[in-house]
Amino acid sequence: MLIKTPMKISLLFIIYLFPLSLLAPLPDCKPSFVFRSVDHEVWHWLSYYNVNEKENWMRVARMESGKHCNSYLSRTQNNVFGMGHARARPTTSQEKKRGHAVYVNIHDSVYDLVLRLERYPQRENFYRYLKRTGYNISPESYEYTLKRVRISDLVDK
């Protein structure tokens, strides 16, 4: 089927009015500053949201993701706390992959922790809280290891 001349002209007119560059996706918004490392970004957001016991949560992030958050889970899914996909509370997780939550960025991972803390408030010792809320599968060894994770490079700065 051939296109009639008036339609060709109208298509050219539309393309002239709306160049293809306007249809291209917008670039991702980036902060006006760059974090020295993922650890510093996590520390920043924990401070920004005024998370209680942020030192302990930073230890959790380092234990779950390694120093500089270089574990597979944190690199591919931006999941620095090793959290599963929430089913019974609001979450910033986009999907569930291999049993863990997938986040768009580090901020969403930290904000999901904030949402978790709002849903399950901490009323006791940090380690009892982890045990009560089922954060980890072996509380005794988790507590033992967590207490030995160093974060002095972040706390001092």
Image (spheres, rainbow, N blue to C red):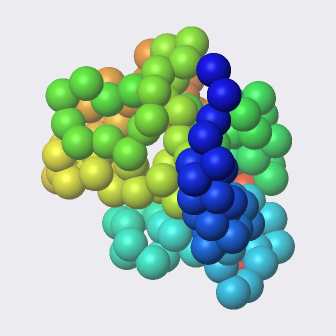
> Where, by quadrant of the figure, is residue 1 drawn?
top right
Front one among 19 and 50: 19
Note whether residue 113 is visible: yes
The answer to whether residue 135 is left or right of residue 81 is left
Residue at image position (23%, 42%) is 90
Q: Examine the rendered structure and indicate whether residue 94 appears above or below residue 97.
A: below
Residue found at x 53% / y 33%: 102
How many numbered circles does the render carry?
0
Please state the horizontal and vertical placement of residue 8, each as a whole percent of the image. 65, 50
In the rendered view, would you say 65 is above or below 111? Answer: above
Q: Residue at x 75, y 39 (%)?
A: 75
The answer to which of 88 and 127 lies nearer the viewer is 88
Residue 66 placed where, x, y %? 76, 41
Q: Is residue 58 left or right of residue 54?
A: right
Farthest residue, direction front: 5
Q: Is residue 45 above or below residue 85?
A: below
Position of residue 58 relative to residue 13, above or below, is above
- For the point 57% across and 13% down, the residue is 98
Q: In the picture provided, is 29 more to the left or to the right than 48? A: right
**Is residue 65 toward the left or the right of residue 45 in the image?**
right
Residue lying at the far top in this picture: please name it. Answer: 98
Residue 25 seen in render: no
Q: Position of residue 69 (x, y in %)?
A: 75, 47
* Quadrant showing the C terminus: bottom right
| Residue 121 coordinates in the image, percent (x, y) | 18, 51
